[in-house]
């Protein structure tokens, strides 16, 4: 199925709403709760809302759903805005806050009270649960349900004035305690809470619930299509009930699509927070985290994430997308955009016994893109190769350097290994090799070919660097299925190499610049820790074919 066909159900709906004159201009919103950093699942929601708005010439708002002050804070508000911008989107107008509508929401709650459609209930949380019934059993009316309008008004105004203790009473809608949909069994509209709010400070001793704030916030902003994930489908009748019973300025509609679930990925802020709090990762932006800030720091390009979100489509059926699809989008993009360079992660000295004078080689920055230019790479008698690229003996399948055999140094000569030294433990400590004259960009004149190509760095001009190699953070393909996140953390998810050696040019990389380290993978200069004096690179992703032996 084409991408176009797969992702069509919201487009079809919107097109018909526009054609039928139900709406004039599409207005969508992305409504995060500022209680953590955004994750890959949110990227899906962001692309859906912003891309639809852009496709249909509409607008998309960014609105913080900030009705839960205890768990929210300003750090998350800043981080979320930065993530949305980084993903490549610009929201319409100023950033918006549900808390800006607290006064209007309060007045609308009073309106319901006046209409006899809301009442103050003094049941404890436990009693209320008992009265609510279950999926198979109708609920029972609260004994406070028959309070008069006057009494309800007085009590609700008292709640607003901060006269009652937290948890002592709530405001509930008066709908139907026997409704098969539990969301309609007199849902809570307001709770008493003494928490300090990051936007409104101590102004409000009562806070609206998500259900009461969300649809009305949509109505205030003129949202036409309130797009959310499937778990809110059962809330839609309540969403519509509020809109029908309140004097709102316009009538938004809610549409649901399936959440993005990706294998080996956690998409729950609550559980991700647990990893941060427990110190399993260095923070919300640890490069192993499936947060947008983590993926960014890992070197994933925003364009690859957008492409992935588009490609998987938008449907109404739950499924798990293989994380390999995202990884492949990242590789495809970086293969095009990342300049090549050389870095030796596990250095082994190699002496070129017949190189009398150092040479400066001009090496292409990209094999298929001349526009990316060339760089100068010094070749000296002392070079470093990766320890895994040399063996004293090996069969023909080993396409690297072997005593008495030949290999090409990437971008330089074909060399032949003659001998090696050993350290006290018997491990190879140095290789001696000869360059074969006439092999710069040419096959050996004697017809004895190289087995493969290996990367290298000049020992005298190379720069020491820290390279952080990452593996998947979770060892379980479905880390979300357990409450105990610790049990599914991969203990080997970070391997820190302190003494890698990189080409001198790489020390000049800008933070966040991504390179392909030849034969190793893609690596990004760390956004925060990298500097010229102390280069730090994070592994973005490995190459599909690690031992590619194509010509230099
Ligand atoms: P979490 O459980 O991680 O806190 P959430 O849904 O509570 O997620 P919100 O900040 O309330 O997080 O979400 C903002 C928007 O992002 C909502 O519209 C929500 O439906 C959407 N969203 C969250 N997770 C996903 C996901 N995995 N796939 C698609 N959309 C998602
Ligand atoms: Mg939420």
Image (cartoon, helix red, strand yellow):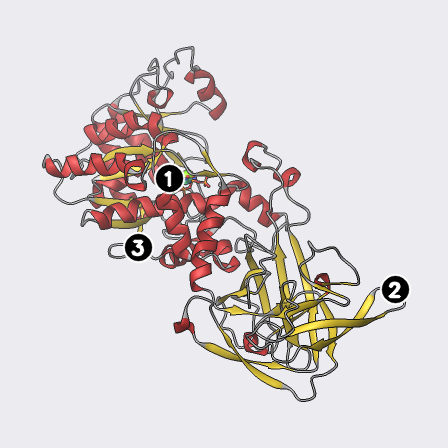
Position of residue 222 measured from the top left corner of the image (x, y, whole percent): 19, 43
| Left or right of 168 in this view: 118 | left
Position of residue 419 measured from the top left corner of the image (x, y, whole percent): 81, 72
Position of residue 182 measured from the top left corner of the image (x, y, whole percent): 38, 20
Q: Residue at x 53, y 77 (%)?
A: 508
Q: Are marks 3 and 1 in contact (CB under 8 Å)?
A: no
First reached walking from the N terminus: tag 2 or tag 1: 1
First reached walking from the N terminus: tag 3 or tag 1: 3
Where 434 sits versus 395, above or below? Answer: below
Q: Nearer the viewer, residue 497 or 396?
A: 396
* Neighbours of disc 3 within 10 Å: few (<14), some (14-19), many (20+): few
Q: From mark 3 to mark 1, how far is it between C-alphas?
A: 21 Å
| The N terminus: image quadrant | top left
Q: Residue at x 47, y 58 (%)?
A: 296
Q: Nearer the viewer, residue 426 or 93?
A: 426
* Outermost residue toward the top in this view: 137
Q: Is residue 204 visible?
A: no
Residue assigned mark 2: 426
* Neighbours of disc 2 within 10 Å: few (<14), some (14-19), many (20+): few
Determine the quadrant in which ligand 1 lies: top left
Q: From mark 2 to mark 1, how far is it between C-alphas?
A: 71 Å
Residue 483 lies in what quarter of the image?
A: top right
Q: Is residue 336 visible?
A: yes
Of the two numbered discs 2 and 3 in the rendering, the one whose residue sits closer to the viewer: 2
Residue assigned mark 1: 207
Where 22 sits versus 538, above or below? Answer: above
Mark 3, secondary structure of its residue: loop
Of the two numbered discs 3 and 1 in the rendering, the one whose residue sits closer to the viewer: 3
Which labelled disc corresponds to residue 95? 3
Which labelled disc corresponds to residue 544? none
| The C terminus: image quadrant | bottom right
């Amino acid at each position: 199925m084409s991408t176009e066909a797969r992702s069509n159900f919201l487009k079809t709906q919107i097109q018909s709403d526009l054609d039928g004159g139900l709406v004039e201009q599409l207005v969508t919103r992305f409504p995060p709760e500022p209680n953590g950093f955004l994750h890959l699942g949110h990227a899906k929601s962001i692309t859906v809302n912003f891309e639809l708005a852009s496709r249909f010439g509409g607008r998309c708002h960014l609105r913080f759903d900030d009705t839960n002050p205890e768990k929210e804070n300003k750090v998350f508000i800043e981080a979320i805005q930065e993530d949305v911008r980084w993903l490549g989107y610009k929201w319409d107008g100023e950033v918006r806050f549900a808390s800006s509508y607290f006064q209007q929401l309060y007045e609308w709650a009073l309106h319901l009270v006046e209409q006899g459609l809301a009442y103050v209930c003094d049941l404890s949380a436990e009693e209320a649960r008992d009265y609510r019934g279950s999926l198979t059993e109708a609920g029972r009316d609260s004994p406070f349900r028959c309070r008069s309008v006057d009494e309800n008004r007085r009590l609700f105004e008292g709640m607003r004035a901060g006269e009652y203790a937290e948890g002592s009473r709530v405001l509930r809608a008066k709908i139907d305690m026997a409704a098969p949909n539990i969301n309609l069994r007199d849902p809570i509209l307001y709770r008493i809470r003494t928490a300090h709010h990051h936007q409104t400070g101590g102004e409000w001793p009562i806070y609206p619930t998500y259900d009461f704030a969300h649809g009305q916030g949509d109505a205030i902003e003129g949202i036409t299509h309130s797009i959310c994930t499937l778990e809110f489908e059962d809330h839609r009748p309540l969403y519509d009930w509020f809109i029908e019973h309140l004097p709102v300025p316009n009538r938004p509609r809610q549409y649901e699509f399936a959440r993005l679930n990706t294998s080996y990925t956690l998409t729950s802020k609550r559980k991700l927070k647990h990893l941060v709090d427990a110190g399993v990762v260095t923070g919300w932006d640890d490069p192993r985290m499936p947060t947008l800030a983590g993926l960014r720091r890992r070197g994933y390009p925003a364009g690859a994430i957008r492409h992935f979100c588009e490609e998987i489509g938008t449907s109404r059926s739950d499924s798990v997308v293989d994380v390999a699809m995202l990884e492949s989008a990242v590789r495809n993009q970086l293969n095009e955009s990342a300049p090549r360079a050389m870095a030796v992660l596990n250095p082994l000295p190699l002496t070129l016994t017949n190189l009398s004078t150092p040479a400066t080689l001009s090496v292409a920055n990209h094999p298929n893109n001349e526009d990316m230019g060339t760089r100068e790479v010094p070749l000296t008698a002392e070079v470093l190769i990766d320890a895994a690229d040399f063996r004293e003996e090996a069969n023909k399948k080993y396409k690297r350097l072997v005593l008495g055999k030949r290999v090409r140094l990437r971008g330089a000569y074909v060399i032949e290994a003659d001998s090696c030294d050993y350290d006290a433990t018997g491990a190879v400590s140095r290789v001696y090799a000869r360059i074969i004259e006439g092999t710069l960009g040419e096959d050996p004149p004697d017809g004895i070919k190289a087995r493969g190509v290996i990367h290298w760095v000049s020992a005298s001009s190379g720069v020491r660097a820290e390279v952080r190699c990452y593996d998947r953070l979770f060892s379980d393909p479905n880390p979300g299925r357990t409450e105990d996140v610790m049990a599914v953390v991969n203990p080997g998810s970070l391997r820190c190499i302190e003494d890698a050696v990189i080409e001198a040019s790489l020390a000049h990389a800008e933070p966040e610049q991504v390179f392909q380290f030849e034969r190793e993978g893609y690596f990004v200069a760390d956004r925060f820790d990298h500097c010229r004096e102390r280069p730090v690179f994070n592994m973005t992703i490995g190459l599909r074919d690690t031992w590619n032996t194509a010509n230099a």
